[in-house]
Image: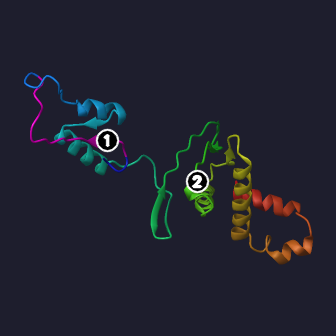
């Protein structure tokens, strides 16, 4: 089986095949047809075809540019981000995050935060980006977006969003909001 697909190579060897004409009580099982029904439709008994699939998969390069790759607890991970600009304004764009899926075994390990931070960092440098919106965000995504926004404000506006500055003003000021909009949009 190939690692990133569901292609299987199936080869069955046997020493002797039952002959239904000589032994009428026994009939050979049609193993390949049986397995093909239970396995995916990408099963092949042709070794040359399977080797071509392996070669094509090895040489495959995904579309786009890899924005983020990192290692966490000894396992290398890389994520690919696809985006579509739905609303094109003259010389401006508003990218939209359509969905972000972190499978349950990988949740609560920082993947979502790193992925969203990478998206924001990549888009922040583009002067055409007017804002980043999310399509029908879940409560968990809203909380994650707030966390990442605060981290970016603290990173790029340390004087304005320091603990001392916030304690001194005891409220969010118009200056803080305007500066945060500049950084995040």
| Residue receiving disc 1 | 7
Nearest to N terminus: mark 1 or mark 2: 1
Answer with the quarter of the image where residue 76 lies.
bottom left
Looking at the picture, does residue 4 appear above or below residue 172? above
Residue 158 appears left or right of 129: right
User: Which residues fall within the magenta stretch?
Assistant: 5-20
Q: Residue furthest left?
A: 22
SS class, disc 2: helix
* 123 in magenta: no
Locate residue 46, reporting x and y percent.
18, 37
SS class, disc 1: loop
Picture disc at residue 104:
2
Magenta part, dominant SS:
loop
Circle count: 2
Locate residue 157, reporting x and y percent.
74, 69
Which residue corresponds to the image point at 34% horizontal and 32% vertical from the top-left? 41
Locate residue 159, reporting x and y percent.
78, 74
Which residue corresponds to the image point at 92% horizontal and 69% vertical from the top-left? 170
Locate residue 11, reporting x and y percent.
19, 41
State how far apart marks 1 and 2 are (Cα): 25 Å
Residue 155 vs residue 116, the one in the foreground: 116
Q: Residue furthest bottom?
A: 164
Residue 181 vs residue 116, the one in the foreground: 116
């Amino acid at each position: 089986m190939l690692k990133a697909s569901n292609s299987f190579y199936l080869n069955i060897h046997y020493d002797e095949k039952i002959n239904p004409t000589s032994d009428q009580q026994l009939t050979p099982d049609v193993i390949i047809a049986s397995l093909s029904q239970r396995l995916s439709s990408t099963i092949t008994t042709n070794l040359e075809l399977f080797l071509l699939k392996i070669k094509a998969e090895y040489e495959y390069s995904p579309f786009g540019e890899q924005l983020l790759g990192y290692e966490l607890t000894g396992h290398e991970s890389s994520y690919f981000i696809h985006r579509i600009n739905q609303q094109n304004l003259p010389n401006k764009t508003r990218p939209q995050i359509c969905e972000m899926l972190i499978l349950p075994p990988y949740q609560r390990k920082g993947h979502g935060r790193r992925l969203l931070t990478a998206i924001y960092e990549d888009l922040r440098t583009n002067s055409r980006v007017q804002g980043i919106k999310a399509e029908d965000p879940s409560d968990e995504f809203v909380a994650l977006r707030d966390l990442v926004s605060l981290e970016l404000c603290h990173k790029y506006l340390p004087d304005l969003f320091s603990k001392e500055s916030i304690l001194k003003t005891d409220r969010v000021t118009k200056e803080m909001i305007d500066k945060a909009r500049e950084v995040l949009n």
